[in-house]
Image: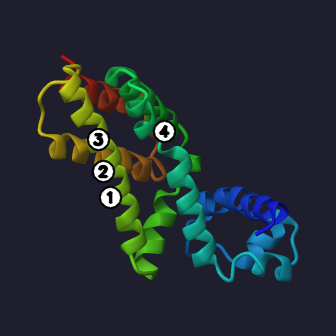
Amino acid sequence: MSAKGIRTKDFILDASYALFAQKGFKQVTMKNVCEITNMSRGGLYSHFPDTATLFEALLEKISDKNAFDIDTEIDKGSPATVILNSALLQMQKEIGHPEDSLSVAIYEYAQMNDPQRIIKLNHHAEDKWERLISYGIKTGEFRDVDVDEIVSIILYSYQGIRMWSRIIPMKKKVSDQIINHIRKQLIP
């Protein structure tokens, strides 16, 4: 794909993010995407044949972008507590912006399509967190915790609050409590 094609594809993904966050997966149409991008149907369809393919590409892009490159930081030898605090800060910022959450869209997508893509993305997130926590235990910066247990607490409390914050107003106190609990569990 040409550089221009890649830029156009990225533009479409960036523009469609807000649509999926606002409407969920079920209610977004290719016509909506055409309107928000000011593209013709032919132009849009040359990049994405349908909303499922578009949403899958968006999830892939987000997974790569938002992973706060834990692996790179570990490979550089950054302190585990610094990596943890950066990742938790990113989570806290995201929790504070429920209007940017794709949780409802992800749920709807998984109901309507093969959920294997979501399962794969979840495993990717689990692997990142497992690597960080194991690294912190190895360096002596973290308590010797049950890695699987704390990863479940981190991922599912985060996803739960992202989903619920779309439905009910979430006080900052709640995200602070979750982030502080994770820190207390890991940092002696």
Mark 4 is surrounded, within 10 Å at the Cα level, by few (under 14), some (14 to 19) or many (20 or more) other residues, namely some
Tag on residue 126?
A: 2
Do the residues bearing badges 1 and 2 touch, measured as CB atoms within 8 Å?
A: yes
Residue 155 or 136: which is nearer the viewer?
Answer: 136
Give the amino acid type for the residue marked by disc 1 in the picture.
His
Measure the alpha-carbon separation of dots 1 and 3. 12 Å
The answer for how far apart the CA atoms under marks 4 and 2 are is: 13 Å
**Residue beneath disc 4:** 68
Q: CA distance from mark 3 to mark 4?
A: 13 Å
Residue 154 percent location from the top left of the image: 29, 41
For marks 1 and 2, give the CA distance. 5 Å
For residue 58, side relative to residue 13 (left or right): left
Of labels 1 and 3, earlier in sequence is 1
In the image, residue 11 sits, relative to residue 92, either above or below, namely below
The disc placed on residue 123 is 1
Mark in the foreground, 3 or 2: 3
Lower position in the chain sequence, tag 3 or tag 2: 2
Identify the residue position indicated by label 3 in the image.
Answer: 131
Task: Give the residue type that dot 2 points to.
Answer: Glu
x, y percentage for residue 74? 38, 32
Q: Amino acid at mark 4?
A: Phe
- As drawn, the residue found furthest toward the top would be 188
- Residue lying at 53% horizontally and 61% vertically, measured from the top left: 59
Look at the numbered disc 4 and give the secondary structure of its residue: loop
